Amino acid sequence: MISNKLFLFGLVAIAAALLLTGCEGVGTGNEAPRFVGGPTGLNTYLIEGMPPPVVFDGNSYPFSVGIMIENQGEVAVGPGTDNPYVMARLVGINPVQFGLTDDSAMQMLESPLQGSKRNFDDTIFPGELTSIVFEPLSYVPDIFGNTQFTIRADVCYDYENMATAIVCIKDDVLESVQDTSICTLSGEKYVQNSGGPLHVTKVTENPMGSNKIQINFMIEHIGIGEFFGRDAGEDCDFSMRNINKYNVDVEVLQFQGDDGLTISCGRFGGSNAGRVKLYQGAPTTISCTIERTRPSAGRIFQDLLNIRLRYRYGQFIETPIIIQDMPE
């Protein structure tokens, strides 16, 4: 009996050890989560019954189109924020036939929406939501027979992401056992992203020589829409003729509290910020250099590399609507 108990105890111990081994550091780099994360900035969906599935012709059936907008990312959007442009418009229909004008078929967000937050106790505080309603619509022409149209709601908005990774800073590129117990200069670093459709999905670090370290990071589109440069007049034109499509503004923030460390990126002409075009939306890698510009005491330490991505994002939702011939 004792032997059986010992055998069962041994199995439980082995299973627990395997479980702990499998969990340690998997997908987290042994780092606590900093962000809510996820591939979404603004989540948009149609309000149920707005529009209804069937309406009547002859200007006899007023109805509305309602769009819910939920800020699932982690930055504020709308008037008075760093991401002020949030626009919704109806497309796929002739506005005049539905009792609208070109101007009334487009609306701007009138009040800011705060983003979601990860609390100190690891709970999630959700972002705010609001609605944009187009009303009244009414199909004006008198048709013969029932007809189906598709109403599409485009939403175009400013957004931004932060990506962070802990990198190793060391003046002497030669590694030692004592150094690697703190951090290593070479290899891939675990990166975390705030919520949004563009992410930094990979960060690698390599020594370049005395007082110089190379940082490579990959930008990848993981959302469901399209992204554009944040230029005046850009209203998320999805056509391939739009040369502003697939542009993103990138800033690698300088390290705080140590003005002896500078970051420069060849793609940005030696600056730490600039614009990048992701060819046809494909992932793109940026290379930068961390350089110590003044003598130090040969220290080795870890620091937080912060990368900001800023862009304008377009996505849409659509639904069929049947125009029914109203008998006289």
Image: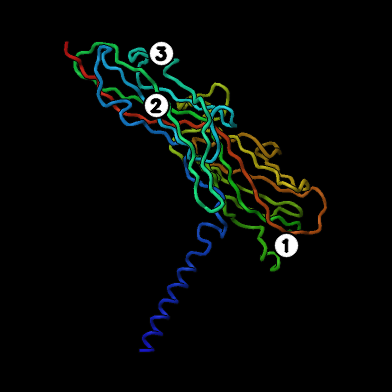
Image point (38%, 88%), residue name: 3
**In the displayed structure image, the side of residue 38 where residue 1 appears, left or right:** left
**Any part of residue 186 in sight:** yes
Q: Earlier in the sequence, mark 1 or mark 2?
A: 2
Circle 3: element type: loop
Of badges 1 and 3, the one in the foreground is 3
The image quarter containing residue 6 is bottom left
Amino acid tagged 1: Leu
Task: Tell me the number on the disc at residue 174.
Answer: 1
Q: Are marks 1 and 3 in contact (CB under 8 Å)?
A: no
**Any part of residue 201 in sight:** no
Label 1 to label 3: alpha-carbon separation: 68 Å
Q: Are marks 1 and 2 in contact (CB under 8 Å)?
A: no
Image point (33%, 13%), residue name: 97
Q: Position of residue 198 (x, y in %)?
A: 52, 40
Label 3 to label 2: alpha-carbon separation: 15 Å
Q: Position of residue 58 (x, y in %)?
A: 25, 11
Reading the image, the residue beneath label 3 is 101
Image point (37%, 27%), residue name: 66
Reading the image, the residue beneath label 2 is 153
